Amino acid sequence: MYIRPFFLFNAHLETIYPALFRRVNAPVYQRERITTKDRDFLDLDWLKRGVEDVVIISHGLEGNSHRAYVTGMANAFFKQGMDVLAWNYRGCSGEMNYSLRFYHSGATDDLQEVIGHCLRLHYKKIYLVGFSLGGNLTLKYLGEREPPQEINRSVVFSVPLDLYTSSIKLAKPSNWIYSQRFLKSLKKKVIDKAKLMKGLDAQGIHFIKTLKEFDDRYTAPLHGFKNAMEYYEQCSAIRQIKNISIPTLIINAKNDPFLSKECFPEKKINSTIRFEYPDQGGHVGFSSFNRNGLYWSEEQALNFILNQE
């Protein structure tokens, strides 16, 4: 079980430290742009050895392929002889996407595009790794679709399985610094995009104070939902995990400041799913200091996927 370093003595330090201070030897990605069915694009960042196994990594809210938790995981699997694909959601690769839509917690159509591309490249085994929003996206994909037989296993971390109750948790005063950071980044994207295309109104956006308000005004209507509540209800992975048919490891730290109690379901939902709820870890934290340079989360993913534990 995970034990945090002594100086990261609370959940907020565990969450903030790796986000701000972890330094990973940056992988030299090969970028590939693919065209989606709606004539938009997704930017994929590859580490390639030319093998038949690939790990697809899905990042968190307002993240990208260069965040330390992604590059750390990418390096870990690449050093074990696997190809790695860290994909960027629409608007997260450094260039605004073409269509009016953005990305969201339930956009499994984009993950399907990425997986389909890997199948066309003739990968024999595909493994999925997801963090936070990317974890919810991964689980929802596996639960609502019939995944291709090439998808072998999945591992997800710090997953807001219930989006509504997690949004309430994130809106608490103790989480103000996180919610405001997300909001600042999301608002900037809307403002920038509104200057480029019709159909997006940024007037009054500065009055939005919570992520739920943002989801009500932008995320939900832009992606076909009536309001934030309908978006949360339909896109929460908790509704889909009972249907997952491939071996899956879900790791949520009990002290994660973002996750509500609903994100820690009973461990008997589905025989293909293994839940791990360490007492410590924060949100996408799990810092470790050892000779191999791996974080505890990376060691768990390697063990589950490579050793078939």
Image (tube, rainbow, N blue to C red):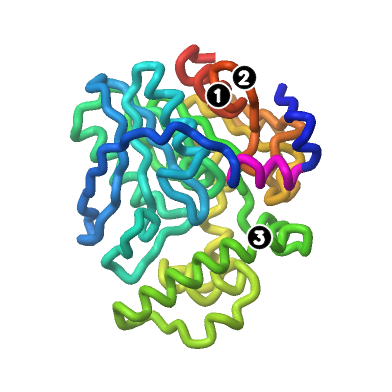
Write down the region rendered in magenta. 11-19
The relative height of residue 133 versus residue 200 in the rendered view (above or below) is above
Q: Position of residue 246 (x, y in %)?
A: 46, 27
- Residue identifier under label 2: 290
Whether the magenta-drawn stretch holds residue 207 is answered as no
Q: Secondary structure at mark 3?
A: helix
Whether the magenta-drawn stretch holds residue 17 is answered as yes
Q: Earlier in the sequence, mark 2 or mark 3?
A: 3
Q: CA distance from mark 1 to mark 2?
A: 7 Å
The relative height of residue 39 versus residue 261 in the rendered view (above or below) is below
- Residue identifier under label 3: 167
Q: Position of residue 21 (x, y in %)?
A: 60, 42
The circle on residue 294 is 1
Q: Is residue 288 visible?
A: yes
Q: Nearer the viewer, residue 71 or 114?
A: 71
Name the residue: 58% across, 29% down.
297
Within 10 Å of disc 2 (Cα), the crowding (few <14, some 14-19, many 20+) is few
